Amino acid sequence: MAIYNLGSINADLLYSVPHLPRPGETLAATGFRRGLGGKGANMSVAAARGAAHVVHIGAVGPDGRWARDLLTEYGVDTRHISVVDDVTGHAIILLDPAGENTIVINPGANHAMTEDQIGLALSEASPGDILLMQNETTHQAFCAKTGSDLGLRVIYAAAPFDAEAVRALLPVMDMLVLNAVEADQLQQALGMAPDALGVSDVIVTLGADGCRWFHAETGQVRDFPALPVTPVDTTGAGDTFTGYLLAGLDRGQPMEQAIGLATKAAALMVTRIGTADVIPDLLEIQQMTQ
Ligand code: ADP
């Protein structure tokens, strides 16, 4: 089986600064690091490290070939990442010594995909494959409808949160993954609790408190604790969780087992600084639990 991921690819441009700049201030950075990021890329890397066959559907600009090459190196199928005439999506992250940050995101090429590109990629999929999306690209509704018509399992990670984007996909959504803040936003915007959405499986991640699974078929709500670790950087925890969860489900694991795997991967991830580049692989997860 395979996971098709319509997802963003960003260059994370991380500048260390003595303090966050005030309006009008010019400030020299004390350090700079470029990493691979974007929720889409992070989830593709996580699922690939979880041993799934992941086909990433995305776009970079001519300045972003390195990001595509890195995804290939990390085991992601990158044949459907196009190089378009736009700047590669990027996040400018300013980080002060206390760990406070400000972030500006420019979607760039992530908003330059076409329906033809998406249709072509999905034409290779087989019924039962997973179609994953987040909210950092365009054409989600088209992609979800096409995937659903082809018999794919449509899974939406609702971040960054937009109630209308969730509402548009609800009729074809098989599974929704969101964090506690997003679940609150959903409740406020649509007036519906996760178990009232008509979606077969809803997972709400709760940070250090683990996650909650709403299973429509049985009406059950089940809680799964997180692993006790000392976090140093929670960036990418949710993306790692989702990628591993889907890798487990894609190879036929029951939900409980896939959540167990995702919980371990995410716990290890929060003990590391960085995003896609440091997502753990299966071997590291096995070693962690020995
Ligand atoms: P997001 O990164 O999307 O905000 P969460 O913060 O809910 O998502 O984290 C996703 C998952 O990562 C959690 O369900 C949990 O399994 C794991 N996780 C997050 N923070 C911690 C932590 N401090 N200790 C252990 N596991 C964590």
Image (tube, rainbow, N blue to C red):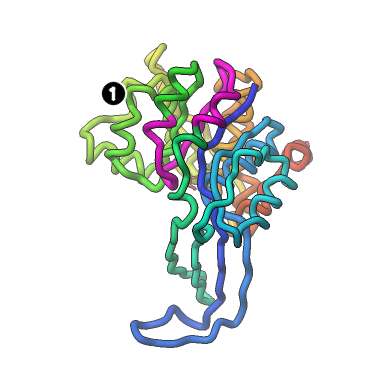
Q: Residues within 10 Å of mark 1 (few under 14, many from 20)?
A: few
At x 49%, y 18%, the residue is: 150
User: Which residue is tagged 1?
Assistant: 196
| Quadrant hosting residue 16 | bottom right
Three-letter code for the amino acid on which mark 1 is drawn: Ala
| Quadrant hosting residue 246 | top right
The reply, left or right, for residue 68 in relation to residue 236 is right
Name the quarter where the C terminus is drawn. top right
Q: Nearer the viewer, residue 70 or 210?
A: 70
In the rendered image, residue 138 lying in the magenta stretch gets the answer yes
At x 43%, y 65%, the residue is: 104
Instruction: Please tell me whether mark 1 sits on a helix, a strand or a loop.
Output: helix
At x 41%, y 19%, the residue is: 200
Whole-percent x, y for residue 21 in the image: 42, 81
Q: Nearer the viewer, residue 30 or 285?
A: 30
Q: Nearer the viewer, residue 147 or 164?
A: 147
- Does the beta carbon of the residue at mark 1 sit less than 8 Å from ligand 1? no
Whole-percent x, y for residue 129 in the image: 57, 21
The reply, left or right, for residue 196 in relation to residue 246 is left
In the rendered image, residue 137 lying in the magenta stretch gets the answer yes
| Residue interval drawn in magenta | 119-143
